[in-house]
Image: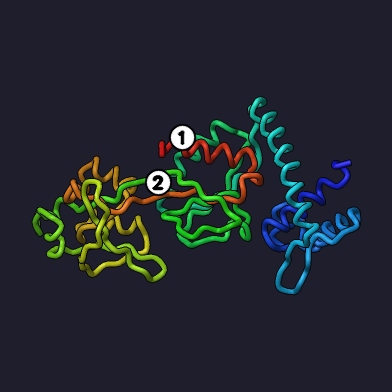
Amino acid sequence: MLSKYLGELMTFMAIVETGSFVAGGRSTGISRSAASKSLARLESRLGVRLMHRTTRALSLTDEGRVYYEKAISVVDALDDAHDSVAASAGTSRGVLRLTAPDTFGRHVVLPLLKRFLAEWPEVQAEVSFSDRPSDIIEEGFDLALRVDYAAPDTQLVSRVIARYERVLVAAPGYLSARGIPKDIDDLADHDALFFFSRGRRQSWQLGSGNGAPVKVQVSGRLRVDSGEALREAAVDGWGIALMPIFLVANELETGKLQRVLPHVVGKTVEISAIYPSKRLLEPRVRRFIDFIVASLEV
């Protein structure tokens, strides 16, 4: 009997979890109108109203809440069965829709994605590398990677997948001309290069050992909203920059940049994977999250 209205059940659950006919329909591959009609058919089959509709919002009725909670356990069982069979058969397929910050995406995600796609040839990828915050449900992403994510959303799951130190770096030529700082107080005599996003300048929080980082007063004339541009400015000798180690590892290895105050580090950068509830994850998405966590060794 379940097979007769499984599509309607899945559409109902998607509407509940996204909060709208538009987003719920999109997540199941149908239009807003079709999603609304699907819910109406399901209510007609059951003989009860599952959701209250207003011009501004949707909300569950008492019957709808009970039905949704029961449906979760059913669909979870189906998902587990599907994943078990898919895993044993070695199948992951479909399009992985991913968004990540531009700099982290280009330097870290792309190389990992290349390896992942080589391992799973039936998976395709659509990737947006942008520092612009995105609504992953409304924009149809399976997964978002975000830096220092600190705004929990009840519709989303957050998992830290990587942590990186922020380090002070400068070009050898700059340090030769301006001198090498001996301690944090010496930074006041140097040109600091700042990253800013959405009009807010990154403050420098520095510390050593296990102590909590403290805000340090520094000044500088250049502010950029691109990690790539900040690194290039440092390489060109504009001043001292505080940057995630993954972004400057190659320049440190080749000598284009060198560590300043090596015993001092900035506040740790946390990279989080943000995605809809675990139940909605396709095997390809779950596998990619596990793959990137294993590769980055959190």
Label 2 secondary element: helix
Neighbours of disc 1 within 10 Å: few (<14), some (14-19), many (20+): few
Judge by depth and name the residue closer to the eye, 109 or 68.
68
Q: Which mark is residue 294?
A: 1
Give the x, y percent position of residue 169: 22, 52
Label 1 secondary element: helix
Above or below: residue 286 compared with residue 55: above
Q: Residue at point 82% right, 45% down?
A: 6
Q: Which quarter of the rendered picture does the C terminus lie within?
A: top left
Q: How far is disc 2 from disc 1 in space, using C-alphas?
A: 17 Å
Q: Residue at point 36% right, 51% down?
A: 269
Look at the image and name its color scheme.
rainbow
User: Is 169 positioned to the left or the right of 128 in the image?
Assistant: left
Above or below: residue 4 compared with residue 57: above
Q: Residue at point 12% right, 64% down?
A: 189
Disc 2 or 1, which lies upstream in sequence? 2
Q: Nearer the viewer, mark 2 or mark 1?
A: 1
Judge by depth and name the residue closer to the eye, 63 or 101.
63
User: Is 274 positioned to the left or the right of 63 in the image?
Assistant: left
Judge by depth and name the residue closer to the eye, 89 or 278.
278
Give the x, y percent position of residue 255: 20, 44
Give the x, y percent position of residue 284: 61, 39
Neighbours of disc 2 within 10 Å: few (<14), some (14-19), many (20+): few
- How many numbered markers are drawn? 2
Q: Amino acid at mark 2?
A: His
Q: Quadrant of residue 78?
A: top right
Cβ–Cβ under 8 Å for marks 2 and 1: no
User: Is 285 positioned to the left or the right of 191 in the image?
Assistant: right
Above or below: residue 6 compared with residue 177: above
Q: Amino acid at mark 1?
A: Ala
Above or below: residue 40 compared with residue 289: below
Q: Which mark is residue 107?
A: 2
